[in-house]
Image (spheres, helix red, strand yellow):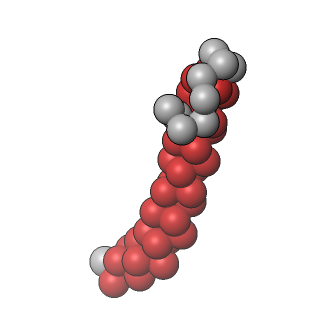
Amino acid sequence: MILARYILREHISPFIFGLSLIVFIFTMNLLFQMLGRIAGKGLPPMVI
């Protein structure tokens, strides 16, 4: 039981870090795609 807790504790923080990094990358990709669509419509930068 102690070994299982140790292994879990050692692996949970890299897992959380990697998961949050992947979510951040996908979110930024989505935002840049949306920004590209909005900017492609010819609106002035102050409106965006």
Q: Indicate the position of residue 20 as horizontal and vertical percent values.
A: 49, 57
Q: Residue at x 46, y 63 (%)?
A: 16
**14 and 35: which one is in front?**
35
List the single residue furthest toward the left. Answer: 1
Image quadrant assignment for residue 35: top right
Exactly how many numbered labels are in the figure? 0
Give percent across and percent down for residue 4: 38, 74
Q: Nearer the viewer, residue 34 or 16?
A: 34
Is there any visible trace of residue 7 in the rendered image?
no
Q: In the drawing, does residue 4 fall left or right of residue 26?
A: left
* Horizontal side of residue 39 vs 14, given as left or right: right
Residue 28 position within the rendered picture, expressed as x and y whole percent measured from the top left: 58, 44
Q: Relative to residue 6, is residue 30 depicted above or below?
A: above
Residue 46 in view here? yes
| Quadrant position of the N terminus in the picture | bottom left
Locate residue 41, reporting x and y percent.
63, 15
User: Is residue 32 placed above or below 9 in the rendered structure?
Assistant: above
The residue at the point 35 percent across, 77 percent down is 5
Instruction: Find residue 36 and report its image quarter.
Output: top right
Of the pair 18 and 2, the residue shown nearer to us: 18
4 or 9: nearer the eye? Answer: 9
Q: Image point 44% across, 68% down: which residue? A: 12
Residue 3 against residue 29 in the figure, above or below: below
* Residue at 52% from the left image edge and 65% from the top image edge: 17
